[in-house]
Image (tube, rainbow, N blue to C red):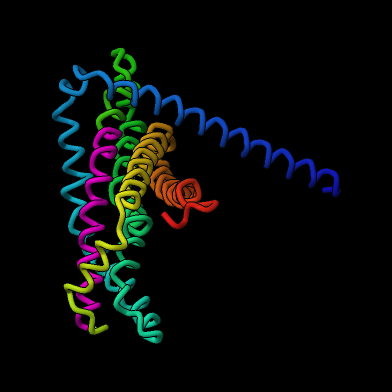
Amino acid sequence: MSKEGQVAKLARTIGARMIQAVDNSGFSLIMAWRAFRWTFVPVQVWKRKGMILRQMYVAGVESLPVTLIVALFIGFLLSLSAGVELARYGQQAVVGQLVAISVCREFGPFMTGLILAANVGSSMAAELGTMKVSEEIDALEVMSIDPARYLVFPRLLAMLCMTPLLTVFSDAVAIVGGGIIAGTQLNVSWAKYYQNVLEGLKLYHIYTGLLKAVVFGITIAIVSCSEGLRTKGGAVGVGKATRSSVIQCYLLILIFGYFLTALFYGKGTSSL
């Protein structure tokens, strides 16, 4: 093949992938709107309360143990790694401020989002993908039942509620974990640690962390359900959809997290 032919083939490949990416994004956005609008209809929320509660149990209760274990060790790592460096300057007492602010602003929502993407998002993609390849989604559409209302809406509302709630638990456990290390490894009393946590932590830090958690929860639900509803190719396609949903959720969590941090703490607002 000539050089010009190779360039043309590369251009066609890139163009096809860009068109596919735009098509997938459009599908996800339209599906998100079709599902999200039902959250403002109390009758629909009440009618789907059984499914919503089941999805809340899966996203919240079943994910709670692993989330708290990860949060505890994140607190251990932050307190130990930062405290060792601060001790070189005799400032290990302020480790409480560093752990509390870091956890509530960044690490709490991030680690909760990543765990839910792997644990709950993959499950959503696999479940809806299996329904898609077994033609259950087509059956719903034949019966004039909107899959976005019947399947996506309960999952979206559950993630919207449970992700911030899990983040609160993660923040609390990580701060306690940091206090354990401060008391046992850094010779900082719990009273001093707790005082520094209260002095350093502001409501602004908590609110921004919870906002990130809400964005991450919506992202996980939309991406996972979208990948599931676009599944094709049988069992192999379900595996690909599951893997793709986790990868996309991870990337979007990191990207959205950066831009939200830049929005709230960039350009002179870092002192807040």
Asked whether 53 or 127 is in front, the reply is 53
Relative vertical location of residue 265 with respect to residue 188 in this rendering, above or below: above
Query: Is 108 a magenta residue?
Result: no
**How far from the left and from the top, in percent, is residue 240?**
43, 46
User: Which image quadrant for residue 202?
Assistant: bottom left
* Residue at the bottom extreme, as displayed: 88
At horizontal 57% and vertical 33% (from top left) the residue drawn is 22
Image side of residue 221 versus residue 44, left or right: right
- Residue 118, can we see it? no
Asked whether 147 or 69 is in front, the reply is 69
Image side of residue 20 versus residue 11, left or right: left
The C terminus, quarter of image: bottom left
At horizontal 46% and vertical 52% (from top left) the residue drawn is 254
Relative vertical location of residue 262 with respect to residue 238 in this rendering, above or below: below
The number of discs equals 0
- For the stretch drawn in magenta, what is the main secondary structure? helix
Query: Is 182 a magenta residue?
Result: yes
**Residue stretch rendered in magenta on the structure:** 155-184
At horizontal 43% and vertical 37% (from top left) the residue drawn is 233
**How far from the left and from the top, in percent, is residue 62?**
17, 50
**How far from the left and from the top, in percent, is residue 105?**
36, 55
**How far from the left and from the top, in percent, is residue 54?**
16, 37
- Residue 24, can we see it? yes
At horizontal 32% and vertical 46% (from top left) the residue drawn is 207
